[in-house]
Amino acid sequence: MATLKDIAKHANVSVCTVSKYLSADMTVKKETEERIQLAIKELGYVPNVVAKALKRKETFNVAVILPKINNLYYSEITSGISQTLGKHHYNLFIYEVDNLNLSEDEILQLMRENMIAGIIFIGLFSDTSFRESIHNAVGWEIPVVYVNRCMPYSGFPLVYPDLVQAGKLGAEQLLSNGKQRIAFVHKKLPDDLLGYFLEGYHQAANSEHKPLLIEIEDGMDLSKSCIPALRENNIDGVFVLNEMSAVYLTKALVDQEIRISEEIAVVSLGNSLISQISTPELTCVDLQNRELGIRSAEIILSQIRKQAFESVTVLEPFIVVRKSA
C-alpha cells in the first residue's frame, strides 16, 4: 500500500508538502498539484480516513436514525438530507431502529463510538422515541436535530410541519367542494396531537362542531368497519390523516361502487408517489417531506460548523388538488 513518502518521492516533492496538500492546509502551484495527483493515481494511494479523523478529532459522517427505510415517507425526507449533505461532501449513514435490536442508549453510544459528527432523528408525528435519551447526545456535544415531531422546544433543534395548518387546508378543500358532513379518519394518535388537526378544522369551518372521528387499526377491513360508519352518519367528505390509509379507503369505496368526489370526497395527509398513482389520484395536503430533510441537514451542518441556526423550524404545508376531492 502506497504511503505519503511514496507519493512524495514519485512527485519529487517533500512529504510535508504532500501531507499539507491532502489536508487542504496549504495551496501549491498548479504544476506541483498535478504531479501529486498523478502520483496518487499511479500508485493507487488511498488516504486513511479513520486515522485522519482521529488526529483531527472530527469526521464528515452524519447519521440518520429512523424506524425503517422501506417507506416512501421516510425515504423522501432522507433524500432531502442526502442531497444537502452531498453538496457539502458529508457522508450519510442510515440506521434503522427496527433492525438494530438495540436500546436507545446503546444506539446513541454506537454513534459516539463511531465518531458521528451529527445525528438526525426522523419519526412519525406521534413517535416519542429518543425524546429523553437524546439529551445524552447533547451532553456529549454531538449535534442533533429532531425531525417531524410536533413538540415543545426542549434544548435541541426541531423541524416539523404545521399540523394546525394541515388540518385547516384539508377541511377547507372539502368545505369548498360543498361537503358538509366531514370525518377525520386516523390511526391511533395522542389526544394533543389529534387536537392540532381539529384546531385546523375549527378554523376552516368557523364552528365548534366537531368532525366525526374514526380510528382505524393496521389490517382493519375498511369496507366492514369504516365505510358503514361513514354511511350511517351521512358523511360526504373525509380527511385521512395517513396517506396509505387513504389509498386503502379509496379502494374500499371503489369496491363498494361509491363515487369518490361526488358521493364521498377524500383528502389525504401526505403527498408521495402513492397518491399520484392511486385510483383515483388523491387530493393531498403536502407536508414538504423533502424540504424537511433539507432543512434538518442544513441545521446539522450549521451546528457542526458552530454557526447560528433556528431552534424551531415549522414548515407550511400546501394543498395539491387531484381527482378525489
Image (cartoon, rainbow, N blue to C red):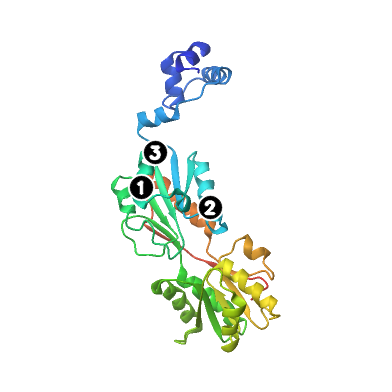
Q: In this view, does 72 lie above or below 111?
A: below
> What is the quadrant of the C terminus in the image?
bottom right
Q: Quick check: marks 1 and 2 in contact, CB under 8 Å?
A: no
Q: In which quarter of the image is residue 224?
A: bottom right
Is residue 224 placed above or below 273 in the rendered structure?
below
Q: Give the amino acid at mark 3.
A: Asn
Please say whether residue 156 is visible from this viewpoint.
yes
- On screen, 86 above or below 14? below
Contact (Cβ within 8 Å) of mark 1 with mark 3 = no
Badge 2, how many Cα within 10 Å: few under 14, some, many 20+? some
Q: Which of marks 2 and 3 is nearer the N terminus?
A: 2
SS for tag 2?
A: loop
Q: Which of marks 1 and 3 is nearer the N terminus?
A: 1
Q: Mark 3 points at which residue?
A: 114
Dot 3: within a 10 Å radius of its alpha carbon, few (fewer than 14), some, or many (20 or more) residues?
Answer: few
Q: Distance from label 1 to label 2 (Cα)?
A: 20 Å
Q: Name the residue under label 1.
A: 106
The percent coordinates of residue 30 (x first, y second) are 53, 21
Q: Residue furthest left?
A: 139
Report helix, strand or loop for mark 1. Answer: helix
Q: Provide the residue designation for mark 2.
A: 69
Residue at mark 1 to residue at mark 3: CA–CA distance: 12 Å
Q: Which amino acid does label 2 sit on?
A: Ile
* Residue 182, horizontal then vertical, whole percent: 55, 83
Task: State which mark lies toward you, 1 or 2.
Answer: 1
Spot occupied by residue 119 in the image (x, y as percentages of width and height):
41, 48
